Image (cartoon, rainbow, N blue to C red):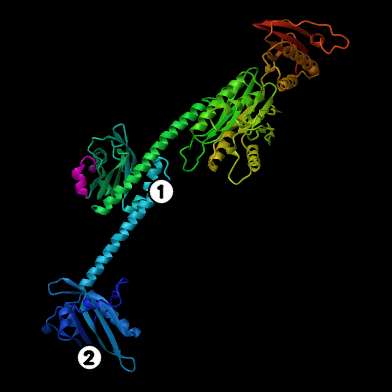
Amino acid sequence: MVDRGASALSLPDDWPAHPDPILALNRMGSFDWDLDTGLFHMDAQAHEVFDLRPEEYDGNPMSLAVRVPRAEAHRLDALVAQAIKDGSENYGTYFRLRCRDGSLRWTHTQGYIRRDGTGRPRRIIGIVRDATQEMGELENRREQAAEEEARRQQTNVVQLTTAALAHARTVQDVIDVLKDTHGLTHLGATSLVMGLVEAGRIRLIAEGPAGSFVPGTDITRIDEPYPMSEAVRTLTPRFIESPEEFADRYPILWPHITGLNITSAAYLPLIAEARPIGAMGLLYSDRYGFTPEDRNVLIALCSSIAQSLQRAMLYEQEKDLATGLQQAMLPRTIPSVPGVDVAVRYRAASAEGSLARDIGGDWYDLIPLPGGRVGAVIGDVQGHDTHAAAVMGQLRIVLRAYAAEGHTPATVMARASVFLHELDTDRFATCLYAEADLSTGVVQVVRAGHIDPLVRQAGGSCRRVTVEGGLPLGLSAEFGQLDYPVATLELDPGDTLLLCTDGLVEKPGTDLDDGMRTLTTLITGGPTDVWELADLLIDVAEERAGDDDVALLLLLRRALDSTESGSRLQQHVAPGDPEALTQARHMIRAAVGAWGARERSDEIELVADELITNALMHTEGAAIVTLRVLTGSDRRMRVEVEDSSSALPRRREAGESGVSGRGLLLVDLLSDVWGVEARGGGKCVWCEFVVREQT
């Protein structure tokens, strides 16, 4: 024991400082090492510990080399030398010695260093004992601790993976969780394969490492000789513990994956509600075999994976149904309307953890109307689910029907509110309806709790149009507040009307007005093409990835090619609706100005107003007002007022104090020509005004 080198084996952290005295009495001997002479004296018990006969030992520590392996001797000598150098009084360590039969035995020694008055070490006395039993127990405890740590790590992986799977909403989410570096790879798996059962076949959805796809296995029958098929068919796991076993059991598959260095594999059925929905395969490149604990962990994990996978499959089915429902409710195509360019966009919300993703109540619509008019609708039903989509579809239909019947924008909105209130639903909806006369550019806007529209002028500037609004649809009917104010604006050729839902402007923690200002700035600097502008706006919404849907409608008024014969406007005026009469007057004034007849504007407005008033006073129905431009030998403006009465108008003499009876007299005096035409069950009173050619 005089060789120098190698570090000592320190006392284990979990080993007691003072060995059990009963164990210490088991083959324990003593020694006395004279450092001056170098002699190492041992008693008979110490000879037994070293498995030496007395004649085999001459007191020279070098004689112990036959029992103490070189590495152990180096370590022991280094330990003693360090203790002497440090001025320590004692040392102790475990070491191994080789017995007579060649086996190794754990031994423990403890020495006490005796020094003279100058501090020079002179002797070391101590004990040496057989530590086989206690080190065996220590090794067992270490193995148990290692096993416990391995189980703890496996349990931790299972818990982390299960927690991550709880947030997986799609099948791809499940695959991504399992392939994540914090997922199953912590269990030692090199790669993952997974398949779903569909109509008696298995469709591969995850194919392991890159370049590992086996031709012909993207879709396989359950009765084919593949491990995944076998796991599904038998509903029992298949553990493959060596390459030889893999090659023997699955000779069709093995030749295709020999280059992947697979040493073992586990194929497990994914069972939910007592039926197989798929199978998962874990491939290993650095392990052989599976302990019972490994198998139990994998089987338990597969149960969690199966539940998550089934939930994801149900989510995707529900999403497909919901998306299909919403697509059916939204317009399939936007009709082509002469005089305008229209772009629409829709982006679904991305609410985290919700099964309602890609479905909501936002909608848009474009409604061609008689007389060169068009209705534009944008709306948002409360909620993000199939019920919201169903309500949205019904609202879109009734709004379209009411507008097509010729009702004024305010009436359209009021009737839609009553309709929603009478539905068996607790949902309300915000909406904005804009009816544009494309010949004059006059736009009538009604707002029900929705955000204001914006107008981008041909020069590029953009402004928010403040519209006095009413309550949302459904609520206004519930509280009896069905009066919706009508705002009027004008679109010049090249101007663009923008309608959108609040998902485009609202962000958590920000003010709506700030969002509108940001949107206005974005539109001002955006492209002039409405389709490119729509793409830009929806891209911004995508980048923000908000939790609300976004619907968008852009309507660009183009310049009319001609205002010759064929220019025509029409307005429905219901009896007892003063707002409709006001709107008709506004339409006439705007049309006269747009068609270059301002010099006769007052005459045309007065005559048209008289004809409309007569129709409403002397008949029991509505009046339909039509304006058109006629060309020929001269250019004329024609006004027609149609009602449901077949009784012809007659001129009456008004007394000096009479307030009526002068209507047809005014028509006759102010118009160049007028007359009456029979129209089915009613009649049409018309008049024409010669106007100058436009320059």
Residue 421 place in picture, x, y as percent: 58, 28
Report the residue at 30% width, 60% height from top.
148
Residue 334 place in picture, x, y as percent: 55, 25
> Does 45 sit above or below residue 415?
below
Which region shows up in magenta?
242-254
- Was residue 251 drawn as part of the magenta stretch in this picture? yes
Taking depth in this image into account, of 287 and 183 the one nearest to the observer is 183
Q: Quadrant of residue 3?
A: bottom left
Element at label 1: helix
Q: Earlier in the sequence, mark 2 or mark 1?
A: 2
- The amino acid on which the numbered mark 1 sits, given as a three-letter code, is Ala
Marks 2 and 1, how far apart at CA: 71 Å
Residue 189 place in picture, x, y as percent: 31, 50
> Does 572 sit above or below residue 66?
above
* Residue 695 seen: no
Element at label 2: loop
Residue behind mark 1 = 164
| Residue furthest front in the image | 479
- The crowding category of the residue bearing disc 2, from other C-alpha atoms within 10 Å (few below 14, some 14 to 19, many at least 20), is few
For discs 2 and 1, the disc positioned in front in the rendered view = 1
Q: Quadrant of the N terminus?
A: bottom left
Q: Quadrant of residue 468?
A: top right
> Does 502 sit above or below residue 490?
below
- The amino acid on which the numbered mark 2 sits, given as a three-letter code, is Thr
Q: Quadrant of the C terminus?
A: top right
| Residue furthest right in the image | 656
Taking depth in this image into account, of 89 and 621 the one nearest to the observer is 621
> Does 608 sit above or below residue 320?
above
Residue behind mark 2 = 37
